[in-house]
Image: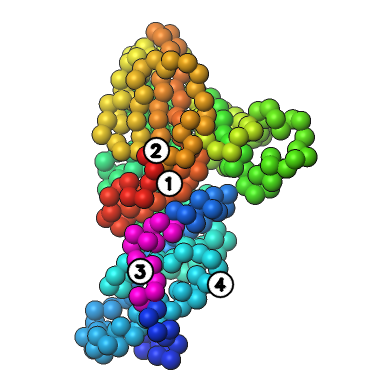
Amino acid sequence: MSDKTIQNTTVGTVQPGALTAIARKEDFLQHLQDFLDTHKTEKWCVAAIDVEHFRLYNELYGTEQGDTLLNTLASHLLDYQKTSGCPVGYWGNDDFFLCLPDEAAREVVPLLRPDVRVLDTSTAHRTAPGWCYGFPELSALQEARIRQARRIAVPGCHASGFIALVYPLVAAGLLNKDALLSCYSLTGYSGGGKKMIAEYESPEKPQSYFAPRIYGLTLKHKHLPEMQKVCGLDYPPVFSPIVDDYYKGMAVTIQLQNRLLNGGPTAEDIYEKLAGWYDGQKLIKVHPFGYDGMIAAADMAGRDSLELIVNGHGEQTMVTALFDNLGKGASGAAVQNMNLMLGFEETAGLAL
């Protein structure tokens, strides 16, 4: 917001008590989580508003006029919330937040000052220059980048699982960057958007919808660019997503021939490497080696954390990332990144 805009602010537009009526930090985070859960099949962007030179404005015009300015801004945001249904929040001082739909975000982001903090859940900026990839578990450095970043792109659901599996193995030198990988991902139908949800929940759905269905047959899934770039791979994996007749939950799996990995590790060696990589992480855990029974893709539904499961023997390894496509794969990841951006406890508002 420019100085000229501040000076031209009309006091008469203020709604009495707007600044006290707008949601504060904790309430906004809860409203945002509820909003993203309700609109889980759509893409949204969260933008931060900081009034430029607000301290100087208070010194020049007085704190009473400064309060009037903040009330005016809060009033406009509450009007936006009323007409759009999108949550808005006030952080204290001169910091405000609002949630924008994907289309509006694409239009607004180029118009924002570089210091405005934006959290984008769409695919638009995940590999774009100048944007920080919102996967803090990559490294301590990546978490530090997120805490300071002005532009953060929240990972895609399938990509979250693949990156959780592959990035540590590449970084540790077990997998070469020119590795030829394949991956499959089983997901609930909620990830397909409103149209797919309506199809699966229709009493007239065709018989084929009662069985798993493979899609992405062009092998050009929209998550492939981030999967390749973030993991530092020379080639994208051959990726097969599969949708099944349940609402939410995801299991992303890679399978490895151990003799093709550097050092010829066993499956248990790979488990030890992943367990060490994620040791101490709050939202990613590694299950003890050797999973007993079958892996159900919906076992993590309703939670915002992710679990890695390693199975295999001396010659072959299978690694699965198990999580909620609407949790760590979507809104849960968005709230995790926002917590880090704002200096909150990383898991605030999340279901572990």
Q: Which residue is mark 4?
A: 83
Name the quadrant of the C terminus: top left
Residues tagged 3 and 2 counted as in contact (Cβ below 8 A)? no
Q: CA distance from mark 4 to mark 1?
A: 26 Å
Q: Residue most toward the left?
A: 59
**For residue 305, which numbered disc appears in the image?**
2
| Nearer-N-terminus badge (3/4) | 4
Q: Which residue is mark 1?
A: 332
Question: Disc 2 on helix, strand or loop?
Answer: loop
Determine whether 242 is above or below 15 in the image.
above
| Nearer-N-terminus badge (2/1) | 2
Question: Disc 1 on helix, strand or loop?
Answer: helix
| Nearer-N-terminus badge (4/1) | 4
Question: Disc 3 on helix, strand or loop?
Answer: strand
Q: CA distance from mark 3 to mark 4?
A: 18 Å
Label 4, residues with CA under 10 Å away: few <14, some 14-19, many ≥20: few
Asked if residue 309 is among those painted magenta in the image, a careful observer would answer: no
Q: Quadrant of residue 192?
A: top right
Determine whether 107 is above or below 323 in the image.
below
Residue at image coords 65%, 44%: 197
Residue at image coords 57%, 34%: 187
Label 2, residues with CA under 10 Å away: few <14, some 14-19, many ≥20: many
Residues tagged 2 and 1 counted as in contact (Cβ below 8 A)? yes
Where does residue 262 sit, x and y in percent of width and height? 36, 17
